[in-house]
Amino acid sequence: MKYAFIAEHVEAHSASALCSVIGVSTSGYYDWRQRRDKPSERANRSQAIDTVVKQCFERKKQRYGSPRVALELVKTGCGYNEKTVAESMKRQGLVAKAGRKFKATTNSKHTLAVAPNLLEQDFTTSAANQKWCGDITYLWTPEGWLYLATVLDLFSRKIIGWSMNAHMTSDLVCDALQMALQRRDYPTDVIVHTDRGSQYCSKLYQRLIKKHELQCSMSKKGDCFDNACAETFFHTLKVEAIHGENIPTRELMREAVFEFIELDYNRTRMHSALGYLSPLAFELQESA
């Protein structure tokens, strides 16, 4: 308390005079000042942790919460547990990008034939190219809508086919399926599950399904859980790469989607359903 009193009044009186009046040594006062002004070992450690955590958070484009940041840091040799990372993120006000709810885009009010539900919400597989799921979502730009169709392999959650167009047509979903077939070397007997939108029920899409000996499966009417994995991917895409970003043109939106799918999601983004491996890493592990 004496040293604190001296420090409070040292601007008005000399330190040596105050020490003499109070009855403490000047050297003792300066030793106290040095200890007080020197950051503690705990404070230094917290600052070091905060620096590493923030760098990782920014490197992952503010997309990761504490569990994924902690796992990412383990890869770099920083063995901070999730609790430590969570405390650091809280101290710094670092919050991963939050989600929103999305509406369905496909039109199921049509008179076209509908395929049976072969999947029945069973998303488990034992190998690649057993079950694929496809879906369409919309992305808004000041130039207008851009529609994205994807095909996802349920084995690794990898996006194996995708297509974008300013119009939501049968060609959109056919192009995505064609990419998936080409990338997977044209497997047969794959269950390809989608909703019952008119694009998937179209003659063009159904001819493609039959030509390549695929099994067409469609969700029950109005049940979004039947295609939950595709919906989850779109949620991740919009939360982590689209919302809050300035994307003024369709062309820039195409670039943002390409970067997210091919460079981030498939290659590096850790997936909880895959033991926190990326889809590509999971496939490589399973094929080793």
Image (cartoon, grey):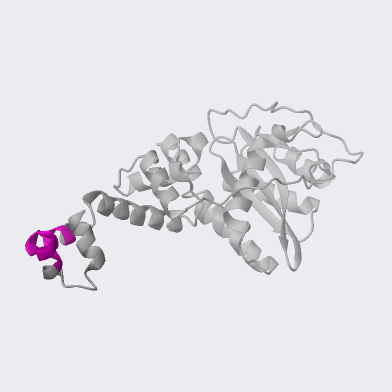
Query: Residue 134 location in percent, x, y?
Result: 69, 42
Rendered position, 61 above or below 284: below
What residue is shown at x 32% (from left), y 49% (from top)? 76
Rendered position, 207 above or below 130: below
Q: Quadrant of residue 10?
A: bottom left
Looking at this rendering, what residue extends furthest in the front direction?
21
Q: In the image, 74: left or right of 5?
A: right
> Which secondary structure dominates the residues rendered in magenta?
helix
Query: Residue 62 location in percent, x, y?
Result: 50, 55
Total numbered labels: 0
Q: In the image, 250: left or right of 237?
A: right
What residue is shown at x 63% (from left), y 52% (from top)? 238
Query: Residue 74 location in percent, x, y?
Result: 34, 44
For residue 99: magenta? no
Q: Can residue 215 be seen in this snapshot?
A: no
Residues in magenta, as a range = 18-33
What residue is shown at x 50% (from left), y 41% (from top)? 271
Q: Can residue 144 be seen in this snapshot?
A: yes
Q: In the image, 288: left or right of 113?
A: left
Rendered position, 185 above or below 226: below
For residue 21: magenta? yes
Which residue is more in the foreground, 199 or 77? 77
